[in-house]
Amino acid sequence: MSKLKTKESIIDSDIKRKYKLQAEGVKVFYDDFMAIKGIDMSIKANKVTAFIGPSGCGKSTFLRLFNRMNDYVDGFRMEGKITIDGGNIYKKKINVEQLRKQVGMVFQKPNPFPKSIFENVAYGLKIQGIKDKRFLQEKVEESLKQVALWDEVKDGLNKSALALSGGQQQRLCIARTLAVEPSVILMDEPTSALDPLSTAKIEELIYELKKEYTIVIVTHNMQQASRVSDYTAFFYMGELIEYDQTKKIFTNPEKQQTENYITGRFG
């Protein structure tokens, strides 16, 4: 039985919808600059959706709308509507901290806390007020097993997370995200700082995690997008140029701009 708090949850577990995340007429401004120019998008549950496009095209900005990370940026303003399971996450009474438990975030560079491996994974649970040692131990083990890290660290849970390799640190950060039981995981270039072997492990992990989570990943790596994602969205200069099944995007795109980017003619 989960001990995680669900009070004030913005996600109604009784709603069964075809799409997990939806954006309607979304525009993003930083002061007078329009970074996102009116995007509509629906993202299916338990799928991996990749955002691709050249640097500065708006894909990371758009990704961070789903857990309101842009709220911290000076001059940020959004128009339009973003929903998760039908719930508007930008309405005034939303508990943003609760939202971020439900919509986990994995960043470009691994960012473990300067604490033990155990404390890193248990951190989110403890700040929710969970003190049951047995539950914490079970949840830490479960989360580390989900990211295929348990066998590598089980005999050193009290060691510093900073002593782990880069790939291990990134899997630890994903375990920390999973421990608080999100339903959506956002990944912003999660393997760009990793070696090829660690990258392969993260990609295998993404494939496994989509059975339980909805995953949205920003990547500059075309091969990675084609390998891990079910759907791909191509962004350019703040606009959504094309969004379809990954196989179609990479083999038979509708738009010439998409084909030019995929084939390396620009970007």
Image (cartoon, grey):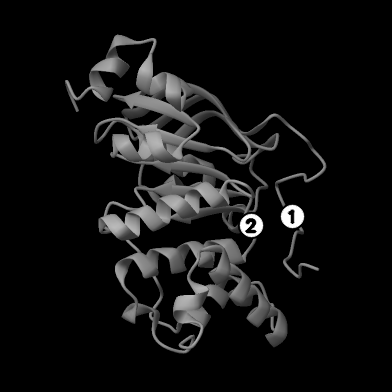
Q: Position of residue 227 (x, y in %)?
A: 40, 38
In-front residue for pair 99/215:
215
In-front residue for pair 228/70:
228
Residue at the left extreme? 265
Residue at 42%, 27% (x, y): give it.
233
Q: Position of residue 98 (x, y in %)?
A: 64, 57
Residue at 49%, 50% (x, y): give it.
206
Q: With 3 as the anchor, is 150 left or right in this view?
A: left
Numbered tag placed on residue 57 in the rendering: none
Q: Crowding at label 2, few (<14), some or many (≥20) Cα neighbours within 10 Å?
A: some
Which amino acid, mark 2?
A: Gln
Q: With 219 as the anchor, is 230 left or right in this view?
A: right
Q: Position of residue 146 (x, y in %)?
A: 57, 63
Image quadrant occupied by the N terminus: bottom right
Q: Position of residue 220 (x, y in %)?
A: 28, 39
Numbered tag placed on residue 98 in the rendering: 2
Image quadrant occupied by the C terminus: top left
Q: Quadrant of the rendered structure where residue 12 is?
A: top right
In-front residue for pair 39/80:
39
| Whole-number angstrom distance, CA of label 2 to CA of label 1 | 7 Å
Local SS, label 1: loop
Q: Quadrant of the rendered structure where residue 253 is?
A: top left
